[in-house]
């Protein structure tokens, strides 16, 4: 049961090109902004699209694969956990950020070569 304590699984699309950084210790960090869309019927029977935005971070080998394969518009599956942190903005106001720390990313969109191969990270 403890493995379910903080687990996130998402399937969605990459909203913008991921950003890649390398830390002073030479560790890759990838940041992905992705969105998921839930479609449901409201009380009037009309279809409603509800979009949620998710900030995803990936470290090390997972970040390297993001750098090489993940691009804007592609569908991905992310498995990881929620991480919260605080920071001060330019005005000195403390802000809180919650991100998904990816442990695994699966590329769901076909590769550009039109193959049906999927890449699991």
Image: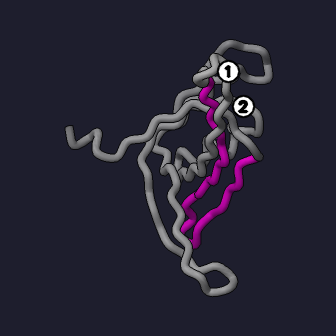
- How many marks the image carries: the answer is 2
Image marks 2 and 1: residues in contact by CB distance under 8 Å: no
The quadrant the N terminus occupies is top left
In percent of width and height, residue 116 lies at 67, 13
In percent of width and height, residue 29 lies at 59, 57
Q: Secondary structure at mark 2?
A: loop
Q: Is residue 115 above or below residue 51?
A: above
Sequence-wise, the earlier of marks 2 and 1 is 1
In percent of width and height, residue 115 lies at 72, 14
- Which residue is painted at 71% across and 49% down in the image? 18
The residue stretch that appears in magenta:
17-40
Other residues around mark 2 within 10 Å, as few (<14) / some (14–19) / many (≥20): some
Task: Report the magenta stretch's main SS.
Answer: strand
Q: Is residue 36 left or right of residue 115?
A: left
Q: Is residue 21 magenta?
A: yes
- Residue 62: quarter of image: top right
- Which residue is painted at 71% across and 20% down in the image? 110
Q: Is residue 24 magenta?
A: yes
Q: Which mark is residue 47?
A: 1
Which of these two is toward me, 16 or 28?
16
Q: Secondary structure at mark 1?
A: strand
Other residues around mark 1 within 10 Å, as few (<14) / some (14–19) / many (≥20): few
- Which residue is painted at 79% across and 19% down in the image? 113
Which of these two is toward me, 92 or 30?
92
Question: Which residue is farthest right?
Answer: 113
Q: For mark 2, what is the residue? A: 74
Question: Which residue is farthest front?
Answer: 44
Label 2 or label 1, whichever lies nearer to me, is 1
In percent of width and height, residue 87 lies at 55, 76
Which of these two is toward me, 4 or 95?
95
């Amino acid at each position: 049961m403890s493995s379910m304590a903080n687990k996130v699984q998402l399937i969605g699309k990459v909203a913008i090109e991921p950003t890649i950084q390398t830390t002073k210790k030479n560790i890759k960090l990838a940041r992905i902004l992705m969105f998921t869309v839930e479609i449901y019927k409201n009380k009037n029977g009309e279809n409603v699209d509800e979009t949620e935005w998710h900030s995803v971070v990936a470290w090390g080998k997972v970040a390297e694969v993001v750098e090489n394969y993940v691009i804007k518009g592609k569908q991905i599956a992310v498995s990881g956990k929620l991480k919260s942190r605080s920071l001060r903005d330019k005005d000195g106001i403390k802000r809180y950020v919650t991100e998904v720390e990816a442990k695994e990313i699966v590329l769901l969109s076909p590769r550009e070569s039109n193959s049906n191969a999927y890449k699991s990270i």
